[in-house]
Image (cartoon, grey):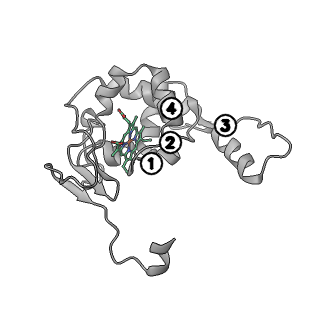
Amino acid sequence: MKKELVVGLLVVTVLTGCSAQAEQDEVIETLHVKWDNPIEAGKYLVTITGCNDCHTDGYLMMGGQVPEEDWLMGSAVGWRGPWGTTYPTNLRLRVQEWDEETWVKTLKNRKALPPMPWMNVNRMSEEDMRAIYVYIKSLGPKGEHVPLAISPELEPQTPYLSLFPQNMPVATSQK
Ligand code: HEC
């Protein structure tokens, strides 16, 4: 694995009248990993951006000690919270079903249920989204599809983690 993966900053055209926040957003979305091999870049990105934390069964609990061949197969352990219960998708199968453009469009635009961090992934540069796609595809299809998300009033029939806020200070919970 090549070590010198460096982040390149492209010149940003700052439109007059942009707020400081908008300028900041524009800078963030022009940053990306420079690579000789998109598969290595994708592996690096998957590792540091936390996709395995949820999309690889056991990864969080075992301190990442899951062989790469079992990465990103999704999980039938639900994440239950005020939004209902969601199951991290099997991305090894999903990249077989979606072409690269669908992958990029979804990562860029989707606003959906927690705990998938859409607000972060939406701001990833297109180059990095493509490298992740190519990497996951290189792992090949493996595993089963996970259960569909269920609504808050339904009791999950699978194992799940509870993410209901507990003992929150009043000031925080009122925000
Ligand atoms: C904190 C947990 C968590 C992390 C971290 C996470 N995901 Fe997810 N992801 C989920 C869950 C749960 C779902 C299913 C959400 C739903 O049912 O609406 C999901 C859904 C998705 C989907 C939609 C798949 C489909 O078929 O609709 C994609 C694509 C995806 N994640 C990619 C990623 C990538 C790439 C990363 C790393 C940059 C990542 N996720 C990090 C939990 C997570």
Image coordinates of residue 37 in percent, x first then y, are: 50, 24
Q: Residues within 10 Å of mark 2 (few under 14, many from 20)?
A: some
Mark 1 nearby-residue class (10 Å; few <14, some 14–19, many ≥20): few
Q: Amino acid at mark 3?
A: Thr
Q: Are marks 4 and 2 in contact (CB under 8 Å)?
A: no
Tell me if I can see residue 39 in this picture: no
Q: Which mark is residue 129?
A: 4
The answer to whether 97 is drawn above or below residue 33 in the figure is above
Residue 88 visible here: yes
Q: Amino acid at mark 1?
A: Pro
Q: Is label 1 in contact with label 2 (beta carbons under 8 Å)?
A: yes
**For the residues marked 4 and 2, what is the alpha-carbon distance in whole angstroms?**
9 Å
Residue reaching furthest to the front:
153
**Dots 1, 4 in contact, CB < 8 A:** no
Residue at the disc numbered 1: 117
Residue 141 is labelled as none
Q: Is residue 114 above or below residue 110?
A: below
Residue at point 74% right, 47% down? 23
Q: CA distance from mark 1 to mark 4?
A: 14 Å
Q: Which numbered disc, 3 or 4, marks the residue that appears first in the sequence?
A: 3
Which comes sooner in the sequence, label 2 or label 3?
Answer: 3
Residue found at the far bottom of this picture: 170
Q: Amino acid at mark 4?
A: Met
Mark 3 sits on what residue?
30
Q: SS for tag 3? A: helix
> Is the residue at mark 1 in contact range of ligand 1, meaning its CB lies under 8 Å from it?
yes
Q: Position of residue 61 (x, y in %)?
A: 25, 56
Marks 3 and 1, Cα distance to the nearest angstrom? 20 Å
Mark 2 touches mark 3? (CB < 8 Å) = no
Disc 2: which residue = 121
Q: Is mark 2 within 8 Å of ligand 1?
A: yes
75 vs 16, left or right, is: left
